[in-house]
Amino acid sequence: AADGIPSAAPAEVALTGAGPSQRFSESDMAHDVHDMAELAKMMSDLPPEDDSGFHEYKRQLIDPSPERFQELISQLKYRITEGQGEALYEIGVEDDGRVRGLPVSELAASLATLSRMAAELGAVAVTVLERPGSQGQAITVLVRMVPQDSQHVEIRIATVGNVDSGKSTLLGVLTRGQLDNGRGAARTAVFRHKHEAESGRTSSISQQVLGFSPVGEVLNYGGGGKDDVHHRTWGEIVSKASKVLAFIDLAGHERYLKTTLFGLTGHLPDYTLVAVDSNRGGVVGMTREHLGIALALNLPVFIVINKIDLCSPHILEKTLASVFSLLKRPGVRKLPVVMRSCEDVLGCLQSLAGRGVVVPIFLVSCVTGASLDLFRFFLNHLPVHADWAEALLQPARMHIDDSYTVTGVGTVVTGTVMGGCVAAGQTLLLGPDQAGHWREVQVRSLRNKRVGVKTVAAGQTAAAALRGKQGQALKKRDVVKGMALLDKSLNPSATWFFSADVVVLVHPTTLRVGYTPVVHALTVRQAARIHAISQYDVLRTGDRARVTFQFLYRPEFLVIGSRIVFREGRTKGIGTIVELQPLLKPQDRLRDVGVNKTASGR
């Protein structure tokens, strides 16, 4: 079970260079043929229509009566709400998924009706794909709301992978619109620190945005299209975008694993992009580690095999074989599929958004631009899988992932709003501090993606300028990662002790009471001692149990149901918080770093 992924005999998997055919070993033939048959059926006819979700099938939309037209508008509004601002319509398709198609005149009339429906709701309809049917052509239409007051769909994507796999270069090319020169010029726009530019390796968490217009055009580049060197600022992108993808660029080196874990837990990504260097001949280094953690956190994954311009065909084949073998292991059970066309992309999106088995794989080059347009098409249609409707009805809650001081503004905190809305001028509670206390602060101003806004809703990230109440100064040293901004009605309390249902992914020996890993829970990152283990004396790799943890240095604000990751050296585990014990206080705050060696069974 190395690196958190259950082990299995390697499968001999090979893909021919540029063709769609796939060859599998005899031992896996029956299972893989079944998988590919299911996938082929999914991409040829389409699965039956689901009454929920953002995907709607229509046989035709020709000259509806006024009453029927209003019903269709209500139905479209529901689908757009389900898609949080966008919907996909399949015209010429039966409810059972059979692609019938329509004659040209009837298809044009149906598209005109759908465009009228979209206009009634302040949206636009754009044809994104045509496919043949038994009676004519069928089309896939993207219906997307036109942004108002900088309101947009926000999707966060964590970018992980081994060091030197081209993560930062890929983001630089996607967000700047210029191909790389083969020596890493594109990544310099992504790095935050001088030493990163000098070494070519990311050591911190940086964010980049990619905006799409209502008709699916990339807004990052100037009027000259994706090859225009005059890229727009974040403010210009966000103000015009209907969908904004926020890429969280994480470190690939083992030395910065704690930073990468903080990005995967504290920045709440919706998807994980795993970058693989095609020229390595397999999945190497920290890629296995990152992929295992992403799958353990139940994050939808897609893979980008990078640098194919440097790779010979047989090495690329070995890399693909390694990726396929890893994803098809017992305990993972994913269906990796190389994306060759727009039809492949649209066929896998529903499964990806619903945390299904399909894992899209893209073969790209940031130097030649190979498959980058197909990858942009995929990103444009990437659905929102997190539903924030219920969270919007809750009191305001924002978890802080960073803080800094701005001259003339004061203390600024950044984080993700997890409940309700945070508004400028609002008074909230900030904490807990070292003693577990909370203090009142006022939100002076708010920014979302560097654009000034009046409110930020659940599911969005924000930067909030704060000031203390009643003349109390608020300094940067008063704010630490893991704190929260909360509405007073939540009556929050800090906790030293909490219980979680955990599973040990990797540990060389045994875990006992007294063992002290570092726990990551949302934006909280702190060493915590195992205080009690239910039903077991020791835990080994693969064991599941309810474990009570005690923070060592300060109480924290936690939320029941939050996922946690705990680690120490090669040890890794995941879990879900099931109980908080705010009334229980520590009798002795252990700070002996040697407790790990005596309590871990070594």
Image (cartoon, rainbow, N blue to C red):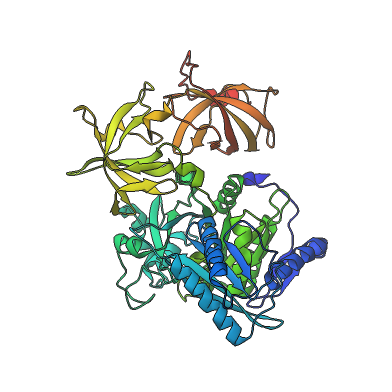
Image point 56% across, 66% down: which residue? 72
Work out whether 542 lies above or below 582: below
Which residue in the rendered view is the most extreme toward the top?
Answer: 587
Work out whether 365 lies above or below 193: below
Residue 562: x percent and y percent?
Answer: 53, 37
Q: Nearer the viewer, residue 365 or 440?
A: 440
Residue 9: x percent and y percent?
Answer: 76, 53
Q: Nearer the viewer, residue 111 or 138?
A: 111
Assign the C terminus to one quadrant of the image.
Answer: top right
Work out whether 463 lies above or below 509: below
Asked if residue 581 can be seen in this view, the reply is yes
Is residue 184 found left or right of 76 in the rendered image?
Answer: left
Is residue 196 found left or right of 514 in the rendered image?
Answer: left
Residue 599: x percent and y percent?
Answer: 59, 23
Q: Nearer the viewer, residue 371 or 271?
A: 271
Image point 47% across, 16% down: which residue? 585
Image point 45% across, 35% down: which residue? 524
Q: Quadrant of residue 184?
A: bottom left
Q: How many marks?
A: 0
Image point 48% across, 31% down: which residue? 558
Q: Nearer the viewer, residue 554 or 10?
A: 554
Residue 505: x percent and y percent?
Answer: 64, 39
Assign the N terminus to one quadrant of the image.
Answer: top right
